[in-house]
Amino acid sequence: MGKTAIVFPGQGAQVVGMGKDVAEMSDAARRVFTRADEILGRKLSEICFEGPADVLNATDTSQPAIFVTSCAIWAAMEERGLAQGFEPSAMAGLSLGEYTALHMAGWIGFEEGLRLVAERGRLMQSAAESSSGSMVSIIGVGEDVVQKICDEAAGSEVLSAANYNCPGQIVISGGKTACERSVSVADKHGAKAIPLVVAGAFHSALMEPAVEGLKTALEAVSINPTRIGVVSNVSADYHAGPEQVRLLLREQVAKPIRWQASIERLVADGFDRFVEVGPGARFDRTAAEDSSRRDGSELLDRRVV
């Protein structure tokens, strides 16, 4: 066996009840949820365990909820000895999941990471509410055709590629009516277009209002690199140091997520075992050894934030 990489999900992985079974069986996981509630001054754990769904699905709640649940699952794995033998030398996460990766790799502390994620969620929700945006998944064509679809459907609105998830699946993001037009334009180009139920045009220029606020929050965070490399969504390369982390996390909000390229970078570097930790991954329901992935194919998914 070669090398192991741990990866973490982004927004879209949330589901009412997530983490409840883990917290019930693990003292370590329960402590993570309890600490998170204390830090945020709200019962985030109750929202994860009981809902309601509309509250959990709100961007300012789902982002810290997924971050905390992912941390709690890993804590439970360590407590039960299920994490032994993985010895990861790299981590990555899709969008929000990159923050989880930076924390779990030891670059950012739990409290600072949680507060940062909560602020990111708040800023992105505010930006979404101040504009009329949406997202559409384009299936079955490559980057060049997706660019043509965006150019033809945009009109006077913003419309651009937001998530390069996997071969044949690219999510576009922008103005609501531009996204609506893209469905028929995609059909003309032989692509399938699936409108996504999202709060806004994430990873597009419509998220720029969130960037400045996130810059301020990132400047206050202590970032300390460790031996575990963390791959950036924006560059699809390893973070080089604290200032680059601050820059790329800031850019990540309004720029495309290059998830496919991120996984391909790890594969090219000899990683042949990928373990996904978080809600929506099989760690929620079964033993860790059943959740290891031999290549990156199953990690190229539809989550977008």
Image (cartoon, rainbow, N blue to C red):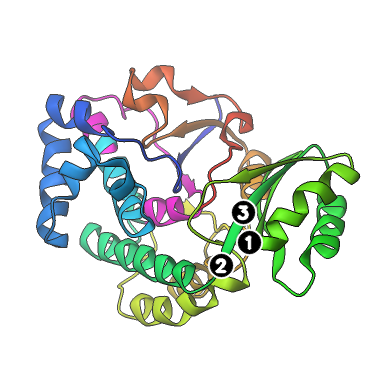
Q: Nearer the viewer, mark 1 or mark 3?
A: 1
The reply to whether residue 236 is visible in this rendering is yes
Q: Amino acid at mark 1?
A: Lys
**Looking at the picture, does residue 181 appear above or below residue 87?**
below
Tag on residue 135? Answer: 3
Image: magenta residue range: 74-102
* Residue behind mark 1: 176
The percent position of residue 119, horizontal first and vertical second, equals 32, 68
The percent position of residue 264, horizontal first and vertical second, equals 67, 43
* Residue behind mark 2: 132
Q: Nearer the viewer, mark 3 or mark 2?
A: 2
Q: Quadrant of residue 222?
A: bottom left
The reply to whether residue 142 is visible in this rendering is no
Residue 103 appears left or right of 128 = left
Mark 1 to mark 3 CA distance (whole Å):
8 Å
**Residue lying at 52% horizontally and 61% vertically, measured from the top left:** 200
